[in-house]
């Protein structure tokens, strides 16, 4: 598989989105090449998922081993470059990336957020949406820039909010959509490509190769 489809995934937790992506790759539904998985937590289930799936390089980097966030991010970035990864996919990665890291990979970092951006950015999006009383929520796949959850939008999906929803029940329905649109967006990204006009992602109509 060519390097334009090579992906590094960064994850901190149980790795549900990572597993969905790896399953889609194995099934032939998502033609990316996951060469590297990085976690900042030794107990992250994402590491076990990656090893079980046969990802070539699975790495735990302890942030406490580095003087500051910039040095930790530099180590991650160097590892990504050494493995020839074109794209960095965030899958439940709970550290805010430094400006240095984002600038090193402009337009190449992808994230999924459990809300319809630009509404409810940040770590408590599901709770914030419920507290606001919205009638619909959902998820957003977007490019990462230096503004938290502020990059150009690649894809979105909407779910209804029920009157008796809790944070967990709403989040569970949102995750169903996350698991649908994340691998589908990665597939479209590598097969069709896109350009950015202002803030708008314009998808190419034909595959790039």
Image: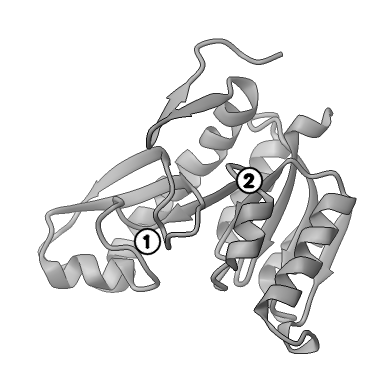
Q: Which mark is residue 200?
A: none
Is residue 82 placed above or below 203 in the rendered structure? Answer: below
User: In which quadrant is the N terminus drawn?
Assistant: top right
Label 2 neighbourhood size at 10 Å, few (<14), some (14-19), many (20+)? many
Residue at disc 2, secondary structure: helix
What residue is disc 1 on? 172
Residue with the most extreme top position: 206
Which of these two is toward me, 193 or 125? Answer: 193
Q: Is residue 162 left or right of residue 166?
A: left
Q: Quadrant of residue 187?
A: top right
What residue is disc 2 on? 21
Q: Is residue 163 left or right of residue 28?
A: left
Q: Quadrant of residue 58?
A: bottom right
Name the N-terminal-most of marks 1 and 2.
2
For image coordinates 60% across by 69% down, the residue present is 14
User: In which quadrant is the C terminus drawn?
Assistant: top right
Q: How many marks?
A: 2
- Residue 54 seen by the camera: no
């Amino acid at each position: 598989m060519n390097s334009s489809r090579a992906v590094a995934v960064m994850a901190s937790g149980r790795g549900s989105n990572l597993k969905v992506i790896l399953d889609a790759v194995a099934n032939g539904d998502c033609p990316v090449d996951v060469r590297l998985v990085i976690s900042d937590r030794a107990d992250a289930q994402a590491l076990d998922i990656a090893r079980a799936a046969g990802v070539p390089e699975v790495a735990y980097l302890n942030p406490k081993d580095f003087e500051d966030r910039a040095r930790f991010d530099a180590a991650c970035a160097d590892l990504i470059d050494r493995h020839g990864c074109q794209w960095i996919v965030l899958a439940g990665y709970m550290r805010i990336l430094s400006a240095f890291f984002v600038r090193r990979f402009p337009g190449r970092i992808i994230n999924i957020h459990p809300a319809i951006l630009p509404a409810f950015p940040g770590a408590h999006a599901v709770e914030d949406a419920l507290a606001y009383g919205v009638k619909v929520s959902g998820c957003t796949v977007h490019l990462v820039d230096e503004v938290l959850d502020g990059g150009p939008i690649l894809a979105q999906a909407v779910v209804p909010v029920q009157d008796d929803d809790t944070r967990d029940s709403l989040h569970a329905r949102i995750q169903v959509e996350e698991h649908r649109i994340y691998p589908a967006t990665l597939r479209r990204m590598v097969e069709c490509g896109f350009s950015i006009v202002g803030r708008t992602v314009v998808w190419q109509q034909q595959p790039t190769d």
